[in-house]
Every structure is written in C-alpha cells, then in structure tokens.
Image (cartoon, grey):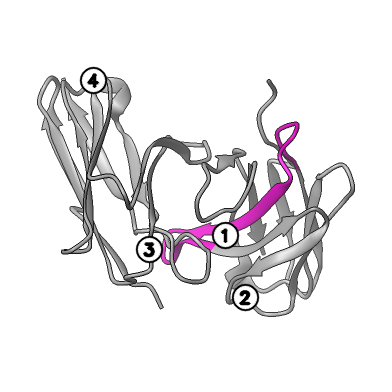
Amino acid sequence: GENVEQHPSTLSVQEGDSAVIKCTYSDSASNYFPWYKQELGKGPQLIIDIRSNVGEKKDQRIAVTLNKTAKHFSLHITETQPEDSAVYFCAPSDSNYQLIWGAGTKLIIKP
Amino acid sequence: KAGVTQTPRYLIKTRGQQVTLSCSPISGHRSVSWYQQTPGQGLQFLFEYFSETQRNKGNFPGRFSGRQFSNSRSEMNVSTLELGDSALYLCASSLGGISNQPQHFGDGTRLSIL
C-alpha cells in the first residue's frame, strides 16, 4: 500500500519568514495531492491541492509544488503570520481511491 | 452555507458498550466519509458512503460500521468498545469521490473509553 512520509515533524519559523513542508509518497498511481491545516479543537481544512497534470499551484501566500518523477510534493507558505500556527497534513490519493495521510507537521510561528 | 455538523462533541463510554455518532454533511454533498484520529496512528480512513451505499472501506474490524440515510446524513456505530477506540472521530463530506475532491470536515466527536 501507499507509504507517506512528511518532514519535518515540527517546524519553528520567525514571523514573516517562509516555511516549507515536504511530503513523499510511494504509490505511482497517486494523482491527487492535497494539503490540510488543522487548528486545535477543529477538523482539518483543505488549504490547497494539486493534480498530477500540474507542477505548481499558488494561492496568495500558499503554494504547492509537485515532482511526480521523484514522488514528492511540498507546501510553501510565505510571509508567515501567527494564524499560520497549526498542524499541516499531506494526504496523497492511492490506487484504492483513498487518501493516505501523513503524520503531520506542527508549524510554530515565533513573534 | 452550513458546514459539516457532528454530534455529540464529547462522549464517555466504558469497555464493552456500544456507541453511535452522527454526521450531517454540507447540503448537496452526497459523499460522507469517516476517519479516526489518534496521537499514535494519526488520521486513518474508516469508510465512505455515497448515496446510501458503502463505496470504500479502510482496514478496521467489523465492530466499526456505518450507514447513510436518504438525506445524506450518516451515522457510525462502534460495538463492544475497547480502550484503544478512544480517539477523535472525524466526518467529512464532499461532492464526489474522496480521492479527487476536497473533503470538508466537521470538528469531530471525541470518544473516551474508561
């Protein structure tokens, strides 16, 4: 089955700096690559997604890049703000039409 | 537009009991999926229902079951509760398939087993 690894597990950045989280997967059939943000006491919320026919997608301060050959995709957050503090999950699709969730990255924005 | 609603928010049960959790999806969404979230195992997929039929299933024992009603509302049932079933149970709804459409999550039901 799909093996998903997410790095780093914890990331601490200064407010205003950029943050990058990487997700590697093993299933070559994966064709949908979302990132979710989970705040304390809340359910995950989709922040950006990308499909296999696209290499990069951007939405204001958030971007996702996909390297299908190397089987990894990354979340990029620029000009980080205190409200970006949360746990971020990657969840690539697999050949069983399910999402396989990474273990999560706790992002801490230092004032 | 109202989001996904899960009830109850918190539940305390003892071993051997059974429990039913409820999920009301976003209006117009026909797919409802359930996930278990624990610190040790992370987010794990339980099952997905679409138009009252189970369309996909994760690797959980038969004690975990669900159903979906004609109005797309869904319930999840866990029988013969074990200590290891303590977790946050999340429900998500979407317009189409779970593997290619955004999932909209509720805030979960936190189940504690004593």
* Residues marked 1 and 4, same chain: no
Image marks 4 and 3: residues in contact by CB distance under 8 Å: no
Residue B87 visible to the viewer: yes
Query: What residue sits right under mark 4 in the picture?
Result: A81
> Residue B14: x percent and y percent?
74, 66
Query: What residue sits right under mark 3 in the picture?
Result: A30
Residue A88 lies in magenta, yes or no? no
- Amino acid found under the numbered disc labelled 1: Gln
Residue B25 lies in magenta, yes or no? yes
In the picture provided, is A17 more to the left or to the right than A67?
Answer: left
> Residue A61: x percent and y percent?
23, 23
Distance (Cα) linking label 1 and label 2: 10 Å
Look at the picture and state if A2 lies above or below A44.
Answer: below
B55 or B92, which is in the foreground? B55
Image marks 3 and 1: residues in contact by CB distance under 8 Å: no
* Residues marked 2 and 3, same chain: no
User: Could you tell me which secondary element the residue under label 2 belongs to?
Assistant: loop
In the rendered structure, the residue with mark 1 lies on which chain? B
Query: What residue sits right under mark 1 in the picture?
Result: B36
| Residue range highlighted in magenta | B24-44
In the picture provided, is B26 more to the left or to the right than A31?
Answer: right
In the rendered structure, the residue with mark 2 lies on which chain? B
Which residue is located at x 75 percent, y 65 percent?
B54
Q: Nearer the N terminus, badge 1 or badge 2?
A: 1
Image marks 1 and 2: residues in contact by CB distance under 8 Å: yes
> Residue B56: x percent and y percent?
65, 67
Distance (Cα) linking label 4 and label 2: 39 Å
- Amino acid found under the numbered disc labelled 2: Phe
Query: What residue sits right under mark 2 in the picture?
Result: B60
* Residues marked 3 and 1, same chain: no
Look at the picture and state if B19 lies above or below B110.
Answer: below
